[in-house]
Amino acid sequence: MKLLTSPASPFARKVRIVLHETGQADEVTEIAAATDPFGDPVDVIHANPLGKIPALVRDDGPALYDSRVITRFLDARAGGRLYPEARIWEVLTLEATADGIMDAALAMVLELRLRAEGERSPKWIEGQWRKVERGLDAIEDRWISHLGGQLDMGQIAVACALGYLDLRHAARDWRAARPQLAQWADRFSARDSMIATAPPAA
């Protein structure tokens, strides 16, 4: 199998962590792929018509895309422990919260990088950051006990979201008002899978 990925993408990192945690990293070849919100990235479109990464190209079926589809596929392939049925709705909700944080944080980056200074909307950027903050506050207030349980996909997604905030929005200091989440992030970041998939410095 081949994984179309990018070193800085938090969504691709989710998939890469699952590969490490489930012992499948050696079965997948990672291929760096560039995306372009304003164009048609040819090397990605053949796998995902939406032109987004990650995408998993399989030998025995159509390519899979959207990180949540790929991670469920890989987890099922390895025995299905990251999406435990007994806690499935909690895991999926926490993963969705983390993915929403990543969506908003990435949208802020694209606004700043791809638009000329006079075309940027500071109000829109701050609106995205408020989404991030609400998501983080929900995790701090309601999900901390879940984060301390057996490893699941919700935890991995949260770790990827926090890592991306550290990479692209460190100056906003998400940790300051969320000490429990900050402590958890420091512990979780020491996992071998997190170290192996750490993005390059901003």
Image (tube, rainbow, N blue to C red):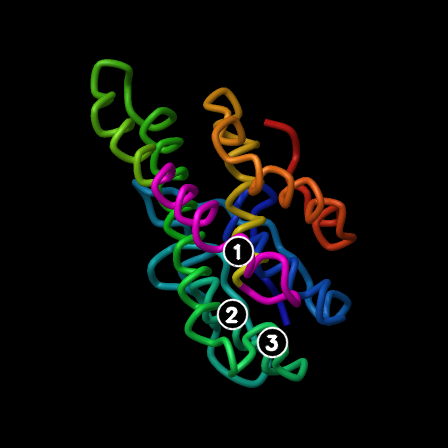
In the rendering, at what x and y percent does residue 99 appear? 42, 53
Amino acid type at circle 1 is Ala
How many other residues sit within 10 Å of disc 3, few (<14), some (14-19) or many (≥20)? Answer: many
In terms of depth relative to the viewer, which is nearer, 32 or 97? 97
> Left of 200 or right of it: where is 96?
left
Residue for point 45% across, 60% down: 94
Q: What stretch of residues is rendered in magenta?
A: 132-153
Residue at which label 3 appears: 75
Between the C-alphas of marks 3 and 2, the distance is 8 Å
Residue at which label 2 appears: 70
Which of pointers 1 and 3 lies earlier in the amino acid sequence?
3
Q: Is residue 76 magenta?
A: no
Amino acid type at circle 2 is Ile
Residue for point 37% across, 50% down: 100
Q: Does the magenta stretch include residue 144?
A: yes
Indicate the quadrant containing the N terminus: top left, top right, bottom left or bottom right.
bottom right
Amino acid type at circle 3 is Asp
Residue 10 is tagged as none
Q: Do the residues bearing badges 3 and 2 touch, measured as CB atoms within 8 Å?
A: no
Residue 48, by quadrant, is bottom left
In the rendering, at what x and y percent does residue 190 appear? 76, 46
Residue at which label 1 appears: 157
Indicate the quadrant containing the C terminus: top left, top right, bottom left or bottom right.
top right
In the rendering, at what x and y percent does residue 192 appear? 78, 53
How many other residues sit within 10 Å of disc 1, few (<14), some (14-19) or many (≥20)? Answer: many
Between the C-alphas of marks 2 and 1, the distance is 13 Å
